[in-house]
Image (cartoon, grey):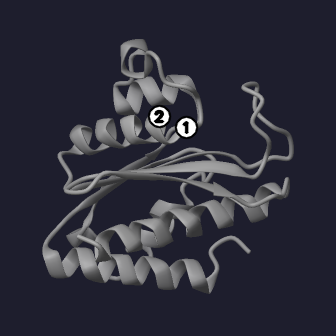
Amino acid sequence: MLGSAELTALAQSVGAVLKERGETVTVAESACGGLISAALLAVPGASAYYAGGTVIYTYPSRRAFLGLTSADVEGLEPMTEAMASRFATLARQKLDADWALVELGIAGPTGSRYGIGAGNAVVGIDGPTNAARMVSTGSNDRTANMDLFARGALEFFAETLHST
């Protein structure tokens, strides 16, 4: 299911809006493992809107690529909309993009050490509008969840773009 036609179509739609507006996006994703970035980059002309991206799967990668400090997440619960929003702000600032799209998730097959089950992700968007949303699949199928999280993130980003 990874790299589905639906994911590509969503990326084409998002890319078209960004190109039309002359805006850029940076992506920081965890459980998706690069699927969001890959979908956006599969669209011809992506260099017009894709500022860069990273996989922030581990704490060291979050510190290295986002500059995340303990002060940045002080008082925030893991896997919450507030945390995803904070990560999105850091990602956008890091590359001076118009938008940032961040995904933090638990693909499975097991849950997290924070007691959150597999099949749950949170997406944060930072830019002219700030928003966050939970994505839940009800499944512990790792591969399917990665794809569904990426689709959920791009769908949410498309909705956000169309509402601004």
> Disc 1 residue type?
Thr
Residue 114 x %, y % = 72, 26
> Disc 2 residue type?
Met
Local SS, label 1? loop
x 74%, y 61%: residue: 137
119 lies above or below 81: below
25 lies above or below 75: below
- Asked if disc 1 and disc 2 are in contact, CB closer than 8 Å, the reply is yes
17 lies above or below 79: below
x 19%, y 56%: residue: 128
Residue 9 x %, y % = 49, 85
Which residue is nearer to you in this view: 68 or 116?
Answer: 116
Decide if residue 52 is on the left or right side of residue 75.
left
For the question of whether residue 43 can be seen, the reply is no
Q: Mark 2 points at which residue?
A: 83
Residue 89 x %, y % = 30, 40
The disc placed on residue 147 is none
Decide if residue 8 is on the left or right side of residue 85.
right
x 45%, y 61%: residue: 37
Residue 104 x %, y % = 56, 43
Q: Residue furthest left?
A: 22
- CA gap between label 1 and label 2 equals 5 Å
Please tell me in which quadrant of the rendered image residue 20 appears: bottom left
Q: Mark 1 points at which residue?
A: 80
Circle 1 packing at 10 Å, graded few (<14), some (14-19), many (20+), is: some
For the question of whether residue 82 can be seen, the reply is yes
Circle 2 packing at 10 Å, graded few (<14), some (14-19), many (20+), is: many
Which residue is nearer to you in this view: 11 or 41?
Answer: 11
Q: In which quarter of the image is the N terminus?
A: bottom right
Q: Quadrant of the C terminus?
A: bottom left
42 lies above or below 61: below
